[in-house]
Image: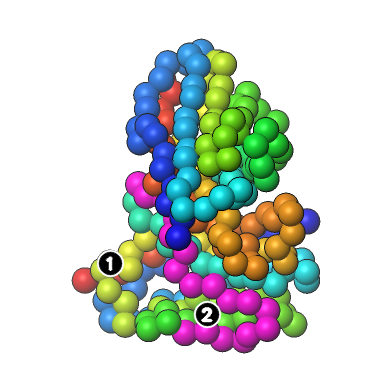
């Protein structure tokens, strides 16, 4: 079964600074990958998904971007962070069954000050 | 597109009692309904799922039911324990395609009081 790693686990950044969050997946090949954001006490907002290397689709307009340089690596970035970017960022991977199971990583807690 | 509603938003039960969380969805093409449990500071964990060709599924103290006609599905937890305290998310998804979006409900915060 797949294992999802995310780092860093926590991050505190000043407004206007850049951001890079990394997600790597083990135990599967050519997975669909997803970035979600969860504001405090809120649900899951899909930010980006990727069906393959270099293929990124954005769900909501924002100052974040995503990249997939390798099959099992998914990166979330920003050139200049905003206060509203604070939240819990989750990477997810689709399972290999015929249904849309999604498996989540441990998350990164981002606080923008 | 698909829209998933979930009730209640918060739920407190005494240890040993049952807890029920209900969800509705809008897209009749959805045929896969997973449930996730999220403990504080952790990523959501898939705990059980149900597919549209099944009306009910049980796994120990957890059961899910699905009513496709009414577009309702529910999570039932019996003999609740303090470790069941968490946020629970329901979700709905159409058949797997090259792009498959899972739509999540807003979540239910469950507290089990010892």
Task: Please say if B12 is above or below A7.
Answer: below
Left or right: A59, with A76 as reference point:
right
Left or right: A7, with B22 as reference point:
left
Residues shaded magenta: B41-58
Crowd band around label 2 with a 10 angstrom C-alpha radius: few (<14), some (14–19), many (20+): many
The answer to which of A49 and B112 lies nearer the viewer is A49
Residue B102 in percent (x, y) is at 64, 57
Task: Please say if B69 is above or below A93.
Answer: below
- Could you tell me which residue is drawn at 54 percent across and 30 percent down? A76
- Which residue is label 2 attached to? B64
**Same chain check for tags 2 and 1:** yes
Which of pointers 2 and 1 lies earlier in the amino acid sequence? 2
- Could you tell me which residue is drawn at 56 percent across and 50 percent down? A29
Q: Quadrant of the N terminus of chain A?
A: bottom left
Q: Which mark is residue B83?
A: 1
Look at the image and say whether residue B53 sits in the magenta stretch: yes
Q: Which mark is residue A89?
A: none
Furthest residue toward left: B114
Residue B27 in percent (x, y) is at 77, 66
Left or right: B50, with A58 as reference point:
left
- Could you tell me which residue is drawn at 51 percent across and 13 percent down? A16
Q: Chain ID for label 1?
A: B
Residue A68 in percent (x, y) is at 60, 33
- Could you tell me which residue is drawn at 71 percent across and 80 percent down? B68
Task: Please say if B79 is above or below A8.
Answer: below
């Amino acid at each position: 079964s797949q294992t999802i790693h995310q780092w860093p686990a926590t991050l505190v950044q000043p407004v206007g600074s850049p951001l890079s969050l990394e997600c790597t997946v083990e135990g599967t090949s050519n997975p669909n990958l997803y970035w979600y954001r969860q504001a405090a006490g809120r649900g899951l907002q899909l930010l980006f998904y990727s069906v393959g290397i270099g293929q990124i689709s954005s769900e909501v307009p924002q100052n974040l971007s995503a990249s997939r340089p390798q099959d099992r690596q998914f990166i979330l970035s920003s050139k200049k962070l905003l206060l509203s970017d604070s939240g819990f960022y989750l990477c997810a991977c689709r399972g290999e069954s015929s249904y849309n199971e999604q498996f989540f990583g441990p998350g990164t807690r981002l606080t923008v000050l | 597109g698909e829209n998933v509603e979930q009730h209640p938003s918060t739920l407190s039960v005494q240890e040993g009692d049952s807890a029920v969380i209900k969800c509705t969805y809008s897209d009749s093409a959805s045929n896969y309904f997973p449930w996730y449990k999220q403990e504080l500071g952790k990523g959501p964990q898939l705990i059980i799922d149900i597919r549209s060709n099944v009306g009910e599924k049980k796994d120990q103290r957890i059961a899910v039911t699905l009513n496709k006609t009414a577009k309702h599905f529910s999570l039932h937890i019996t003999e609740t324990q303090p470790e069941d305290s968490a946020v629970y998310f329901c979700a709905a998804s159409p058949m797997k395609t090259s792009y498959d979006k899972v739509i999540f409900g807003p979540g239910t915060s469950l507290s089990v009081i010892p």
